[in-house]
Amino acid sequence: MTMATSAKTTAASHVEWGRVRPARRNADRLMKVIATGFTLVAIVVLFWILGMLIVKGLGGLSVATFTQITPGPGTEGGGLANAIVGSIVLTFLGIAVATPIGVLAGTYLAEYGKASKLADLIRFINDILLSAPSILIGLFVYVILVEPFRGYSGWAGGVALGIIAIPVIVRTTEDMLRLVPGGLREAGAALGAPPSVVITSVTWRAAKSGMVTGILLALARIAGETAPLIFTALNNNFWFSPNLVGGVSNLPVTIYQFASAPYENWQQLAWAGSLIITVSILVLSIIARRIVRGGK
Amino acid sequence: MAAVTDQFAAPSAPVRKTPMGTFDLVFRNASLLAALFVLVLLAGIMVSMVVGGWPAFREFGLGFITSSVWDTQNEQYGAWPAIVGTLSTALIALVVGVPLSLGIAVFLTQLAPPWFKQPVSTAIELLAAVPSIIYGMWGLFVFAPLFAAYVQIPLSNLVEGMPVVGTILYSRSPSGLGILSAGIILAFMIIPFIASITRDMLDQIPSVLRESAYGIGATTWEVVRHVLVPQAGVSIIGAVMLGLGRALGETMAVTFVVGNANRLSPSVMDPGSTIASRIANEFNEALGLQLNSLIALGCILFFVTFVVLVIARLLVARVKRY
């Protein structure tokens, strides 16, 4: 249908201009030029940012970037090994916190709550959390997990990232479960399976790829988050202790601290880190998109 | 169909006293708890902001909002410059970002050939995936020097001595950093959100409306102006509010380019600060009342964005859901 519609639209936009008053014709042309130009501006900015990262980041990338730890002030060389590992640990900690809660909450909304008042309220609040400033979530975790325990920790960082990921997972899980045809659920129920079994072994299975997409999108969302980590995991220039107590080095805060530092090797590393983090996130988002399109 | 499915999941469904029945009950309650946790989160954020900021509110009262002093030596804190910075950067972001977003949405839904629509849509959405801190790097190292050389310096020379614009647009130290730069960077960050929601809204309008307008000889512009925009109207405002919510709380990019000055300047070219940038800048060195004042700033940000986002969601939901 969309094909037919757009064909018609194209046909309609090629009306005989001779029969249209010049003022109307010019307004139309002006609008088309402006809309196309605006789109071009946004695309140029995207490729400008990517180009900047490649030009400045590739120069700083080397084997040492992945094998050595972040250098102290005034120290030569160094790499990002501890920051990269720290970021991976924090991000997966966040996903580990968010996935069970997000999937279960999304399941509640799609399978149990449905159109009830409570479900509507939860949906509404979830949508608000989805766009809530991440800095507030960082402050929140600072107040409940950092201040009482008198110290920054990787756990607090993971929880903060998890809280940012939860609404993303809730939303996609619900949307994906809603796409599963009711007939499948009824077939399961007709075999005598209780709702929980129908959900876990029929509905979830049918919506699997969509739900994985939601988790990937959440991963992409939190991997580059900086603001909430400043108040929770902070950063450090060494290998963090395995119990994650004390500052845990991570890429975003390292970039933040190194970017405008007076040491050239720090700036180089900030660019290299920016390239690594952006490429990872863009690849994740593109994979997630592919899964959605392949699943349909 | 819906009715049958409803019955099957109805809470009154008999629970058998078997291991399966227990699992059923546990699963149901676990999912309910997880869903309630979403409410607890929002309430928790609200309570922790109010409690954490309380000492500052108690100490300064309403003066905390209206005072422009931020003096760590004498423990005097006022939020006014940060509030004005937050509102003005967000406003600039909307003024720049909304026309761009609407243009993109119109291009994607009305002008782009089908094979071109998908890659352009993806590119716009990838703008949203780029982390905030990368926008900050771009703003500080690429945008700001160009902005200083090609906008601030020529413009300052031009407007110097003029009434009003000579104050608002004059930059005393053309570094490229300031309220206007932050607003422009924010604009690019909110474009993907406004553009993709508007695109979805325009796509949802029944094509028969469009076709009948074309049928009576309307041009594309007239169809957009008189058919599509009135149809999508309220939800476009909702999308804009959603963008505003993003712009108000955006932290890292703004911290890089806003200049982080604590005083209020009459010129949009001068450095300033926003609530979020001030918190990000000072938090790790802050102690005592300063820390409470920063959390109190967070509290103000929370309530402002909360109101904006509630309005946004109500307006968007009108069209989108069901």
Image: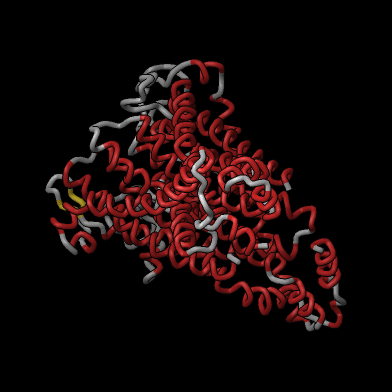
Kindly tell me whether residue B96 is visible in this rendering. Answer: yes
State the residue at coordinates (86%, 80%): A18
- Looking at the image, residue B176 sits to the left or right of residue B275; the answer is right
Q: Nearer the viewer, residue A184 or A53?
A: A184
Q: Quadrant of residue A147?
A: top left
Question: Does residue B141 show up?
Answer: no
Please name the residue shown 52% across and 62% down the image.
B96
Q: How is the image coloured?
A: secondary structure
Picture quadrant of residue A292: top right
Q: Nearer the viewer, residue B253 or A293?
A: A293
Q: Is residue B170 above or below residue B295?
A: below
Q: Residue at x 34, y 56 (%)?
A: B302
Question: Looking at the picture, does residue B189 appear above or below residue B321?
Answer: above
The image position of residue B256, as x and y in percent, is 41, 44
Residue B135: x, y in percent? 50, 44
- Nearest the viewer among B119 and B177 is B119
If the image is split into quadrants, where does the N terminus of chain A sit? bottom right
Say left or right for A187 vs A149.
Answer: right
Q: Position of residue B60 (x, y in %)?
A: 15, 58
Residue at the front extreme?
B17
Q: Is residue B25 left or right of residue B208?
A: left
Q: Point out residue B170 in the picture as x, y percentages from the top left corner.
A: 39, 60
Relative vertical location of residue A249 with respect to residue B77 in this rendering, above or below = above
Viewer-side residue, A8 vs B160 = A8
Please count the marks in the image.
Answer: 0
